[in-house]
Image (cartoon, rainbow, N blue to C red):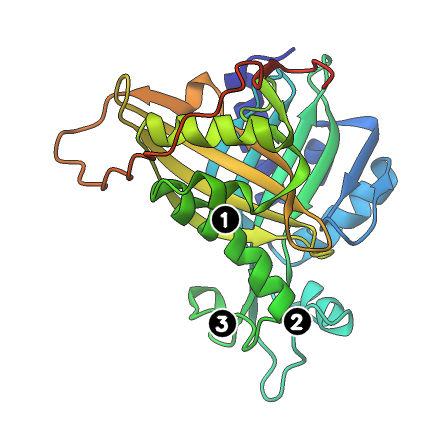
Amino acid sequence: MLNERTRKKIAREHSRRLSEGDIDGLLDLYAKDVTFEAPVGAGGQAGHEALRAHFESAIAGNVDETIVESVVGQDGRHVLSRITAVMDYRPRGPLYADRGWLPAPEGAEPTALRCHYALLLRVGESGLIEDMRAYWGKPDLETSVDGRSGPFVGPPVIDPDEAALRELPHNYLRLLQKGDVEGTVALFTDDIVFEDPVGGLLLRGKDALREHAFRGSEGKVHEMLGRLVTSMDGRFVVVLGDARVYVPARMRMRMITICEVNEDRLGAHIQGFWGLTDMTIGFPDDDTAPEPALDTARRPERKDALKPFGTPS
């Protein structure tokens, strides 16, 4: 297993080489039999040849990436980054428009394209990337007719299913922070799988989730959400979070969570990525983030709800 800082360095190097157009150096970061899906929902591919073709179109558009945040799993394998990529409209813009991912230009063709996305890398013992997944949906694409300085404009309309998917994390946080444990649990399937953090604890089912949600209220956790991104198949929403824990000690955690939903838009699998290097102890007294309400409901009775990662249910 690779340590957290090494995995974050790989993520930074990935964006640097892509932005510099170093496609051979970029491929050197990947195992020969790598699997990837970019964007998630467009279909998986494998191998260096397919990966080269994928990156060549981005490099042809002079892509320039900025990492907003990188966090890791506690499994020694994963690093997850929220990234903003800016590139020329061509060659990818017309292709995206043909696929229905972007509206076709009605007047002057845009000059620049911006994509907000999340990049999940699984790194093997060799230090090479074995799997890559890029999460972004139609609302995560923006265009500009004024060049890379913008302003960038997203789609004029978001379809109801996409809007409901993007609302799920906000509903979860709103209910959790007001102390409504039952309302929080109702957002998920009966057989929910909840990894928080990935490589740490694995929770299965609503009873385990109920205990987890109660502890969140009991520990006075306040979380602020960053910009959400989704996937092309409408199954995933990925959210950057900044959490402050007040009890038993003041801690701050930067995290990125991947939520998979079912056809009823209920959370079915939650993966929270945060490592020891994503935590800091203490924060200033003038940090005015409001403390959440404490749930006054009876504490759940189950004491076996939290199980070590990998323990069968």
Find residue 277 and name its label. Answer: none
With respect to residue 10, does 290 lie above or below? below
Residue type at the position of mark 2: Leu
Give the mark nearer the N terminus: 2 vs 3: 2
Single out the residue that lies furthest toward the bottom.
Answer: 107
Is residue 67 visible in the rendered structure shown here?
Answer: no
> In the rendered structure, which amino acid carries the disc numbered 1?
Pro
**Label annotation for residue 153:** 3
Q: Position of residue 39 (x, y in %)?
A: 71, 51
Disc 3 secondary structure class:
loop
Badge 2 element: loop
- Disc 2 versus disc 1: distance between alpha carbons? 25 Å
Task: Answer above or below: position of 6 versus 240.
Answer: above
- Please name the residue shown 60% across and 55% down the image: 62
Instruction: Quickly name the residue at label 2.
Output: 102
Residue 114, x across and y down, in percent: 54, 60
**Alpha-carbon neighbours of circle 3 within 10 Å: few (<14), some, or many (≥20)?**
some
Quadrant of the rendering where the C terminus is positioned: top right
The numbered mark, 3 or 1, whose residue comes first in the sequence reads: 3
Is residue 300 in sight in this rendering? Answer: yes
Q: Quadrant of the N terminus?
A: top right
Task: Work out how far the residue at label 2 is from the one at label 3, CA to CA, in angstroms.
Answer: 11 Å
Q: For residue 169, which numbered disc appears in the image?
A: 1
- The amino acid on which the numbered mark 3 sits, given as a three-letter code, is Val
In the foreground, 10 or 125: 125
| Residue at image point 22% right, 42% down | 290
* Secondary structure found at label 1: helix
